[in-house]
């Protein structure tokens, strides 16, 4: 595994994955293809931009010309697809970009990777494709797909496309499905970074509905190590679930965040529920544990504390996003490269 193409590598999980690859594997060459949407941030990989094993290409996975010319120019051993629209609330307001990037983008990548006979393809998916659980039970890789939001429907559609390429063409693809990630570089529209930033600024923390929805939280590096294990040790055609074994109600995690930040619970504001809000996600990872030798390494409380510290220590990163000034910053820092 020498040359890999990572799509969406300027996003939260993709950038952490690239950081892991470049830190762990001295011989690796990583090409990062990213469109730089609102959530793609070059700053996430600032410390690696002059690394000899790293190159950034600005481009859209839905554009067959861009993708095919990249695969013509480099003989990739693997493609790992992180590029996605990922925020459920945005998909409820406008599903268009989700259909384009998550479904059409996956189809373009699959066709190009198949044409170029790439030996390994990893589709980074989500536990949300399984739908919602009641108070008991876990999602396994056998749980039927039953997405409830436009976001999860677009991810499920992409997973089914991948499955069809495995079945029809013997294409060597693997699907990974993970629970809710937390950690450094997460765009502050998701629960944890949004609430840390709001609390720091003395703004309210909007809890949807009664706050009793349950999510299973995993540190992004544990997820990235899981994707790495699937890439290197996984069997083509297989699905692997990853989760953090850290289920919490939204209200519980919100109170914990406020406690760690030493901020008052009076900042909590109950607001109208998310339409079609999935009640609970919880995931069985025994297949990844037994077949890939993977396990969660980060203790949830310690990981959350470290994440809070990262946000507190990087106020410029947060503020440039929250004030909408990060585009200007990019152009100043990367103008020439962005145009090329
Ligand atoms: C942003 C926000 C969220 N929430 C609630 C909704 C959810 O029950 C929970 C977490 O919300 P989010 O951070 O948006 O994440 P969620 O909808 O669970 O989806 C995440 O986790 C999924 C994996 O389960 C990923 O596939 C998605 O890309 C990712 O966005 O907190 C609030 O109560 N208030 C908020 O302001």
Image (cartoon, rainbow, N blue to C red):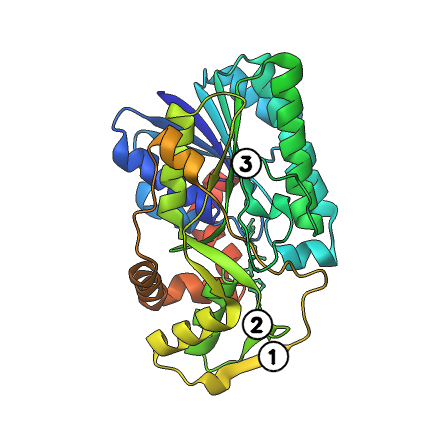
Q: Report x, y in % for residue 75.
A: 45, 15
136 with respect to 88 (left or right): left
Q: Secondary structure at mark 2?
A: loop
**CA distance for labels 3 and 2:** 28 Å
Does the beta carbon of the residue at mark 2 sit less than 8 Å from ligand 1? yes
Q: Earlier in the sequence, mark 3 or mark 1?
A: 3
Q: Earlier in the sequence, mark 2 or mark 1?
A: 2
**CA distance for labels 3 and 1:** 34 Å
The answer to whether mark 2 and mark 1 are in CB contact below 8 A is: yes
**CA distance for labels 2 and 1:** 8 Å
| 147 over 23 or under it: above or below | below
Mark 3 Cα shell of 10 Å, populated few (<14), some (14-19), many (≥20): many
The answer to whether mark 3 and mark 1 are in CB contact below 8 A is: no
- Which residue carries the number 3 mark? 141
- Which residue carries the number 1 mark? 270
Question: Residue at point 26% right, 34% down?
Answer: 24
- Which residue carries the number 2 mark? 211
Q: Which residue is more in the foreground, 298 or 264?
A: 298
Whether residue 65 is visible to the viewer of this picture, yes or no, is no
| 171 over 105 or under it: above or below | above
């Amino acid at each position: 595994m020498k040359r890999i193409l990572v799509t969406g590598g300027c996003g939260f999980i993709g950038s952490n994955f690239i950081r892991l690859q470049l830190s762990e594997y001295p011989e690796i060459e990583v090409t990062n293809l990213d469109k730089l949407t609102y959530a793609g941030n070059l700053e996430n990989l600032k410390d690696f931009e002059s690394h000899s094993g790293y190159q950034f290409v600005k481009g859209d996975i839905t554009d067959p010309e861009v993708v095919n010319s990249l695969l013509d120019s480099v003989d990739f051993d693997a493609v790992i697809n992180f590029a996605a629209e990922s925020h459920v609330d945005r998909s409820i307001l406008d599903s268009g970009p989700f259909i384009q990037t998550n479904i059409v983008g996956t189809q373009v990548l699959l066709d190009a990777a198949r044409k170029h006979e790439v030996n390994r393809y990893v589709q980074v998916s989500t536990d949300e494709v399984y739908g919602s659980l009641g108070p008991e039970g876990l999602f396994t890789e056998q749980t039927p797909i039953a997405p409830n939001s436009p976001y999860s429907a677009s991810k499920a559609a992409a997973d089914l496309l991948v499955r069809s390429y495995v079945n029809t063409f013997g294409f060597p693809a693997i699907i990974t499905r993970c629970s809710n990630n937390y950690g450094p570089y997460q765009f502050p529209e998701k629960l944890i970074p949004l609430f840390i930033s709001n609390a720091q600024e003395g703004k309210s923390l909007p809890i949807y509905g009664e706050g009793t929805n349950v999510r299973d939280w995993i540190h992004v590096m544990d997820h990235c190590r899981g994707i790495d294990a699937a890439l290197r040790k996984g069997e083509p055609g297989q699905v692997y679930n990853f989760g953090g074994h850290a289920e919490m109600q939204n209200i519980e995690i919100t109170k914990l965040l406020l406690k760690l930040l030493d901020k008052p619970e009076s900042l909590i504001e109950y607001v109208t529920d998310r339409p079609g809000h999935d009640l609970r996600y919880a995931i069985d990872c025994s297949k990844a544990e037994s077949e890939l030798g993977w396990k969660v390494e980060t203790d949830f409380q310690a990981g959350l504390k470290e994440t809070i510290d990262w946000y507190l220590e990087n106020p410029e990163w947060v503020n440039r996003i929250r004030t909408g000034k990060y585009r200007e910053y990019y152009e100043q820092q990367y103008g020439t490269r962005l145009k090329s």
